[in-house]
Image: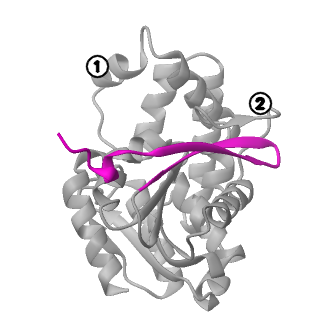
């Protein structure tokens, strides 16, 4: 049996200020960067393999998550730091400027990168960034965010997740939450989750983009929303971002993690966006 080169990732690490970043490269061709926060490289692997048939695809574990280790484990993960990490990775692989798909907190990281280094990003798809500061009910959302973080750090994991899904306007039955987040769990998953609650959630959701800088940047910015995300918090934040940029959002298959749920159809839609650019 012949191995498809797109199925094989070159796995390496890069030392950056305060951390060592795990990253993976697949394929050959124009550079695509797939980034989440707190999602790691593994979540993007199925989509990366599909795109690597004719692109160089870079994925990474964000600083402090899974295989990307921090010098100081108590350091907060800010969009500015994560944008600098992405900038260093793009320069390191020396295949840019890049097409970047950032999802959730990764979209916040990528927007921060577009503000500071637009020369490295020719197109950015910001898929459902949770930018609550763009919304009129931001104060209520901040209060809710602080409450669910306190709940988690006090040890009530399932209680925190129930509050999280309620604030995100995502319907998730309580028995499902109990099954997903109660009982015995993978230690690495728990460590990454705790880091997200303690050191990442605030800085990602409270970050405020500079719409004027983003409009003036050479980067083409596409705001993405999942077809199944209507009415959810990230649907609202994404539409607010698009409005601030004077654009219309672009829909993608699935929901908040459509690239995980249906990578085939997501890749097809993403290729259409690439061609349109």
Instruction: Assign a secondary structure to mark 1.
Output: helix
> Is-magenta flag for residue 15?
yes
Q: Which residues are magenta?
A: 1-26
Residue 91: which disc?
A: none
Q: Is residue 198 visible?
A: yes
- Residue bearing mark 2: 73
Q: Is residue 210 visible?
A: no
Residue 53 pos. (x, y %)? 29, 61
Q: Residues within 10 Å of mark 2 (few under 14, many from 20)?
A: few
Instruction: Assign a secondary structure to mark 2.
Output: loop
Q: Which residue is found at the position 41% from the left and 70% from the top?
A: 29
> Is-magenta flag for residue 69?
no
- Residue bearing mark 1: 175
User: Foreground residue, 217 or 45?
Assistant: 45
Q: Which residue is found at the position 58% from the left and 61% from the top?
A: 108
User: Foreground residue, 48 or 55?
Assistant: 55
Determine the image quadrant of residue 9. top left
């Amino acid at each position: 049996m012949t191995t498809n080169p797109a199925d094989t990732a070159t796995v390496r690490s890069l030392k950056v200020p305060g951390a060592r970043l795990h990253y993976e490269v697949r394929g050959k061709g124009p550079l695509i960067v797939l980034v989440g926060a707190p999602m790691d490289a593994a979540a993007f692997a199925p989509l990366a393999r599909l795109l690597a048939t004719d692109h160089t695809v870079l994925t990474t574990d964000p600083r402090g998550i899974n295989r990307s280790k921090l010098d100081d484990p108590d350091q907060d993960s800010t969009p500015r730091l994560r944008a600098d990490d992405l900038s260093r990775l793009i320069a390191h692989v020396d295949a840019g400027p890049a097409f970047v798909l950032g999802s959730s907190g990764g979209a916040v990281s990528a927007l921060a990168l577009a503000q500071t280094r637009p020369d490295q990003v020719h197109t950015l798809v910001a898929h459902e960034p949770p930018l609550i500061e763009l919304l009129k009910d931001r104060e209520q959302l901040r209060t809710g965010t602080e409450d669910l973080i306190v709940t988690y750090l006090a040890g009530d994991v399932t209680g925190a997740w129930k509050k999280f899904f309620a604030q995100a306007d995502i319907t998730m039955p309580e028995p499902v939450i109990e099954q997903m987040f109660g009982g015995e769990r993978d230690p690495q998953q728990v460590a990454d989750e705790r880091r997200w609650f303690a050191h990442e959630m605030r800085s990602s959701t409270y970050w405020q983009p500079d719409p004027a800088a983003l409009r003036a940047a050479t980067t083409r910015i596409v705001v993405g929303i999942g077809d199944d995300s209507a009415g959810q918090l990230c649907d609202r934040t994404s539409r607010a971002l698009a409005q601030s940029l004077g654009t219309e959002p672009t829909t993608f298959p699935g929901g908040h993690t459509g690239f995980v749920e249906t990578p085939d159809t997501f890749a097809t839609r993403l290729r259409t966006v690439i061609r349109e650019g």
